[in-house]
Image (tube, coloured by chain):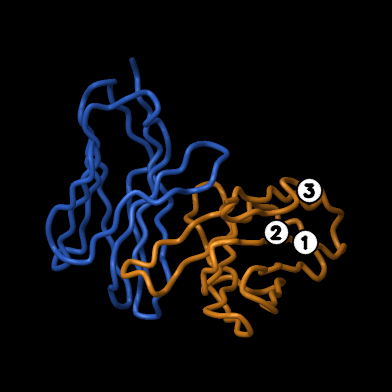
Chain colours: A blue, B orange
Amino acid sequence: GQNIDQPTEMTATEGAIVQINCTYQTSGFNGLFWYQQHAGEAPTFLSYNVLDGLEEKGRFSSFLSRSKGYSYLLLKELQMKDSASYLCAVRDSNYQLIWGAGTKLIIKP
Amino acid sequence: IAGITQAPTSQILAAGRRMTLRCTQDMRHNAMYWYRQDLGLGLRLIHYSNTAGTTGKGEVPDGYSVSRANTDDFPLTLASAVPSQTSVYFCASSDSQVPHNEQFFGPGTRLTVL
């Protein structure tokens, strides 16, 4: 079967750095997405990786290793507004997104 | 530009009743999707449409039907609601001409079936 694993919850301190990991086993691979979802709101797109390596976008970076079935989202200079759930999703051989359950990130002052 | 709108925002429904969740996008995206989101689970695809006039089944299609008469609208119908269909429903759209084809989500409909 297809599976996306990410930690259920993480806690970090304002101003610090946090890394959210995602491992996947899917039938085919056509890209990996990270989305942010604030409580009670819709998911919003953060990043996309299809080749191995690091993609940087401001305070957020995303890394992919296809051989290891592994990605991480790195958030720097954490702000209170970064408190949210972070969803990892893989596009499979049918070009459909398979979603992880999400990681709830709690930021403490 | 509104993006994607969904209606209603929330609904309480008696089991056995028929219900249609509405979704409209103004981005001229060719592809549209319906997901349900339940606590502790990832988003699960119910149905999708790659282009107007075509639809396909996702991971959890039973009890749901969709239609795609035009580019903008993608309604989801529960023919006879059951309590296990209590969930938050998200509609999404994407442009398959864009290399990474990211999905844009509507604000969601919170449905409770009693």
To the question of a shared chain for discs 3 and 2, the answer is yes
For mark 2, give the secondary structure. Answer: helix
Q: Is residue B39 positioned above or below A98 on the image? A: above
The chain identifier of the residue carrying mark 3 reads B
Q: Please state if A64 lies on the left or on the right of B31 as rendered.
A: left
To the question of a shared chain for discs 2 and 1, the answer is yes
Q: Residues within 10 Å of mark 1 (few under 14, many from 20)?
A: some
CB within 8 Å, label 2 to label 1: yes
Distance from Cα at disc 1 to Cα at disc 3:
14 Å
Q: Residue at x 45, y 69 (%)?
A: B95
Q: Residues within 10 Å of mark 3 (few under 14, many from 20)?
A: some
Give x and y (percent) for residue B55: 60, 81
Q: Nearer the viewer, mark 1 or mark 3?
A: 3
Q: Residues within 10 Å of mark 2 (few under 14, many from 20)?
A: some
User: What label sits on residue B94 in the rendered view?
Assistant: none
Q: Please state if B103 lies on the left or on the right of A109 as rendered.
A: right
Give x and y (percent) for residue B70: 66, 77
Give the residue number, with chain letter if any, for mark 3.
B11
Give the residue number, with chain letter if any, for mark 2.
B85
Distance from Cα at disc 2 to Cα at disc 1:
6 Å
Question: In the rendered structure, which amino acid carries the disc numbered 3?
Answer: Gln
Question: In the rendered structure, which amino acid carries the disc numbered 1?
Answer: Val
Q: Residue at x 57, y 81 (%)?
A: B56
Residue at the farthest bottom position = B53
Question: In the rendered structure, which amino acid carries the disc numbered 2?
Answer: Gln
Dot 1 or dot 3, earlier in sequence? 3
The chain identifier of the residue carrying mark 2 reads B
Residue at the farthest front position = B1
Q: Is residue A55 positioned above or below B48 on the image? A: above
Dot 3 or dot 2, earlier in sequence? 3
